[in-house]
Image (spheres, helix red, strand yellow):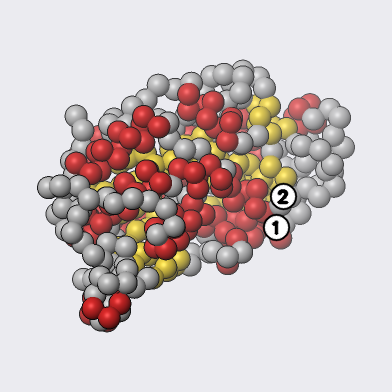
Amino acid sequence: MPLATRHLQRCRLLQLAAAGAVAGGTVPPALAQDAFGQALLQGAGSTFVLPLVQQWIRQYREGQVGADLAAGNAGLDGDPLGRAALDYEAIGSLAGLQRLQAKAVDFAFSELPLSPPALAERGLIQLPVVLGGVAVVANLPSLKSRLRLDGATLAAVFRGHITRWNDAAIAALNPDLPLPDAAIAPIHRAEGSGTTYTLTRYLATQDAGWQQAVGVDAQVRWPTGTAARGSSGVARELAATTGGIGYLDAVQARATGLAVVMLRNAAGRYVLPEAAAIEAAAQATPWRAGQDAQPQFIDAPGEASYPIAATVLALLNRQPASRGDRRARAFLAWALANGQDSARALGYVALPAEVAQQVRAQLLAGRPQA
């Protein structure tokens, strides 16, 4: 699917149960729907992870890879319709959380970490599934080499303090680059987004006035620029706006064909949001699978680290009371066991093997670890 057609589209992927699960190899209409009248398993949330979720769903449905997920006494086995139908709606991290809270979906993906008190109040757990980077993208067709920016300059651009591409601050970072005398057109997400949260959290570490002037959240008080809905909306707006600058997850940023900016990291090196640089940032920050407060690897130390890396989190009901809850755990456990190669192939960073094993065990046990 072209990136430009992904804007708030429901990526509905339906499949009848495996042959033999129901007599005759077909599923009666009544079995093809659940209490919500749609797919047997529904998720919503992050657009950041959409390309990977689409790949995982395709593999899970078609049985291309994987193994039996039976887990005695966990409520995950003996469900012949477990792979029958999946539906993921890429509507943004905040909206995905809201849909999960409303019991409209069985799981959500987000880069917006909840605090332990917030998780306890909502009866949820959050678990890491994959790592990724937030890329800064510019539409500057006249440039023949990579644009370099540091955090303070990027913050000044999004605050409207730097308004032209040949500004002295940008020129000082790119002495050999002929910068155009053209207006800068910032582009940002319109809806609540984990990508926005990750970017603004980084910019707050680079600009002492950012928190008060703009904020750190899924939705903030952007002082300038154009709002676009979803990652696909940002990508479309960037492609149509010469002089535009915006932010996307690294996988979808590369798909635009536009210039991905090199950002200065904590060690003073300029790096791209490539898998090795995101992995370096993760390795520089100690963490464990069972902790509620998930790290986001912002401005991590190390010469190879990319400064805006995030954890993609799965949000689930703490107690798997419904069949949908159990199916969601089975799907995520499958993805952690069998979907990490797909993550690497697309440009995401897989969880460390020991962390993925811990998270999978947590899912199959049906309860959070202490």
Provide residue 244's location: percent of width, then percent of height.
Answer: 70, 50
Question: The C terminus is located in which quarter?
Answer: top left
- In the picture of the structure, the residue carrying the numbered disc 2 is 258
Provide residue 253's location: percent of width, then percent of height.
Answer: 62, 48
Residue in the image at 45% along x and 61% along y: 58
Identify whether 87 is placed above or below 330. Answer: below
Tell me the distance, in whole angstroms, between the alpha carbons under discs 1 and 2. 8 Å
Pointer 1 or 2: first along the chain = 1
Identify whether 319 is placed above or below 358. Answer: below
Q: In this view, does 153 lie to the left or right of 105?
A: right
Q: Is residue 188 left or right of residue 183?
A: left
Residue in the image at 24% along x and 75% along y: 22
Residue 170 visible, this orientation: yes
- In the picture of the structure, the residue carrying the numbered disc 1 is 239
Residue in the image at 64% along x and 60% along y: 236
Provide residue 50's location: percent of width, then percent of height.
Answer: 48, 55
Q: Of the residues shown, which amino acid type is indicated by label 2?
A: Leu
Q: What element carries label 2?
A: loop
Q: Quarter of the image holding residue 288?
A: top left
Question: The N terminus is located in which quarter?
Answer: bottom right
**Callout 1 touching callout 2 (CB < 8 Å):** yes
